[in-house]
Amino acid sequence: MTSRNFARVIGIVFLAVGVLGFVPGLKSPPPLWAPNMVADGEYGLLLGLFPVNWIHNLVHLIIGFAAWRASNTMSDARKFARGLAIVYGGLAVMGLIPVLNSTFGLIPLFGHDVWLHAATAAIAAYFGFGQRAEKMEIRERYKRAA
């Protein structure tokens, strides 16, 4: 997979997750131990696993649009992947710190979101900072040109 394809896939996944987060039937109430949210509209566990609220859903939609837009060029896709790796790595760490795992009551970052953010950061780092993805894309471009 190339960095451009990675950005396209991430775009589709994040747009889908952002939309699904607004579907009430796909969410269960947050557990009793979950932190209270200042922005508690649409607050719940998506698919019974991942904490979301309306701001979290909007962030997913914004990232999805940014990823789709970045997938137009290899350079933009790699920059997007690098940014996603850094931001999502930070979010994974924040999710481990009790005072920060609700982003000051705005966006829930606890539970299964922690490992999901860490995995997203690791995969994005591979496509953003790894050389293999770029070399594969360059080879594909030369094959198409020949």
Image (cartoon, grey):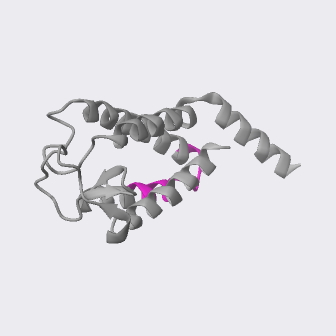
Tell me if 9 is positioned left or right of 111 in this view: right
> Split into 4 quadrants, where in the image is the N terminus?
top right
x%, y% of residue 67?
48, 54
Q: Is residue 68 inside the magenta stretch?
A: yes
Please give the name of the residue rendered at 32% of the width and 70% of the height, measured from the top-left corner.
Answer: 24
Tell me if 57 is positioned left or right of 4 in this view: left
Is residue 146 placed above or below 17 in the rendered structure? above
Tell me if 19 is positioned left or right of 90 in this view: right
Please give the name of the residue rendered at 59% of the width and 51% of the height, measured from the top-left corner.
Answer: 73
Q: Is residue 48 inside the magenta stretch?
A: no
- The majority secondary structure of the magenta stretch comes to helix
Is residue 68 placed above or below 86 in the rendered structure? below
Q: Is residue 4 visible?
A: yes
45 or 95, nearer to the observer: 45
x%, y% of residue 141?
76, 47
45 or 1, nearer to the observer: 45
Q: Is residue 83 visible?
A: no
How many numbered dots are placed on residues in this image? 0
x%, y% of residue 45?
31, 55
The residue positioned farthest toward the front in the image shown: 32
16 or 63, nearer to the observer: 16
Please give the name of the residue rendered at 54% of the width and 50% of the height, measured from the top-left corner.
Answer: 7
x%, y% of residue 39?
14, 58
Q: For residue 47, what is the image quadrant? A: bottom left
100 or 3, nearer to the observer: 100
The residue positioned farthest toward the right in the image shown: 146
Tell me if 3 is positioned left or right of 95 in this view: right
Highlighted range, magenta = 63-75
Is residue 72 placed above or below 34 in the rendered structure? below
